Image (cartoon, helix red, strand yellow):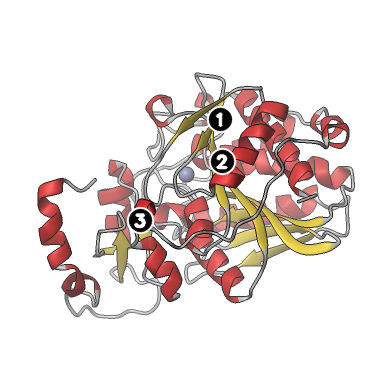
Amino acid sequence: MLSTFVLPLFLASASLVAAVPPQVRPYFGQGANDELRLIKTSELDPGTWVTEEQKITDYVAKDIHFIDITDIKNETTLARLSTPQEVSTLESRAITYPSAISHQTQANPLIAQLTTTGPKTWMTALTTFYNRYYRSTTGTQAGTYLLALAKNLTASNPAIVVSTFTHSFNQPSIIVKIPGTSPNLVIVGAHYDSTGGSSTARGPGADDNASGTCTLLEALRILSLSRFAPKNTLEFHFYAGEEGGLLGSAAVFANYASAGKNVLAMVAQDMTGYSPSGKVSVYTDYADAGLTGFVRKVVVGYAGGAYTTDKCGYGCSDHASAFSNGFPASYVCDEVIKTSSPYIHSPQDALSTIDFTAVLRHSKFTVGFLVEASYL
Ligand SMILES: [Zn+2]
């Protein structure tokens, strides 16, 4: 967080700081260890050039949120990322969301089939990788595992398409599509990379974010098994490189924006398995207000009946990438910040800390949301 008295100095130096890397470094090719990246920690932060390692050790490990803007070229997106929300005139395209949920007859029998059996197995596998750091070999292997798992879980419905979205680093994002009769998109997303606080640290990433990943996988399993045939096209996104500054989701949504895709709703889930309150938390910043209201109705109707509310700041998770590309986005988490898992971004974010009733609650939310939003 910027303190008030340093702000003028920061602003004055803005144009000088961000434009070029501060020094010439030997270039060893894309993804080299000392390649500098430009990151922003707030709208008014002009940006700082750091190494990949510094992003993790100096920011993630210290709980400082940031967005890596090195590869973001779209001027409107960059303007959004530099405009405080309270003065922003760049609003998401207005979509009117239903004032009440209305597809319980279809959603409830699907929700009744959700279990924790799969999530327990898959989360065991995901947390067994030494880490899922987006630039590590095991991070790439986790992607290979997830791709095979997604194909396996959707084999029951040949209409479903599983694909990879590749990046400049080796870990791919994975996209699973349930085609609808309309190409308009409803997206649920979760990042699957992890970090233990440095590029070489053990990073089981159980709550952050094997939990959200398995939440989506269980919802996908049931929608596939039931051969759910939506009006709108549904997509499950498993993002790479979130811990490196929202890298995977930023690339995916930049691509969707330039391709002119029509995204009706995007909901990110990042941490779904540690919840002392036993309530889903619906966050309100860098989110579309109308969609967030609709999401709350889905929580009330399908996922426990009560919710909490919080804000998580600049660049806190992948919904920010959808939002900055002009798409309506929302963020759902297992807890408010104050009582959230104290173990994330460390070797202690272990499977043993996971409450699978919380994961199941989020799977119920996911199926309820996708059934309702498939009719938008
Ligand atoms: Zn996360």
Residue 324 shown left or right of residue 98 in the figure: left
Q: Position of residue 182 (x, y in %)?
A: 81, 63
Give the structural element (helix, strand or loop) at label 3.
helix
Q: Nearer the viewer, mark 2 or mark 3?
A: 3
Q: Earlier in the sequence, mark 2 or mark 1?
A: 2
Which amino acid, by three-letter code, is at mark 1? Gly
Which amino acid, by three-letter code, is at mark 2? Ala
Tell me how far mark 2 sits from mark 3, CA to CA.
36 Å
Q: Quadrant of residue 16?
A: bottom left
Label 3, on which residue?
Answer: 87
Q: Is residue 268 visible?
A: no
Residue 42 shown left or right of residue 304 in the figure: left
Query: Which residue appears at 57% of the width and 63% of the height?
Result: 172
Q: Earlier in the sequence, mark 2 or mark 3?
A: 3
Query: Which residue appears at 79% of the width and 56% of the height?
Result: 232
As drawn, the label of residue 210 is 2
As drawn, the label of residue 273 is 1
Question: Disc 3, disc 1: CB below 8 Å?
Answer: no
As drawn, the label of residue 130 is none
Question: Disc 2, disc 1: CB below 8 Å?
Answer: yes
Q: Dot 2, how many residues are within 10 Å of its Cα: few (below 14), some (14-19), or many (20+)?
A: many
Query: Which residue appears at 44% of the width and 60% of the height?
Result: 135
Q: Position of residue 348 (x, y in %)?
A: 41, 31
Q: Dot 1, how many residues are within 10 Å of its Cα: few (below 14), some (14-19), or many (20+)?
A: many
Give the structural element (helix, strand or loop) at label 1.
loop
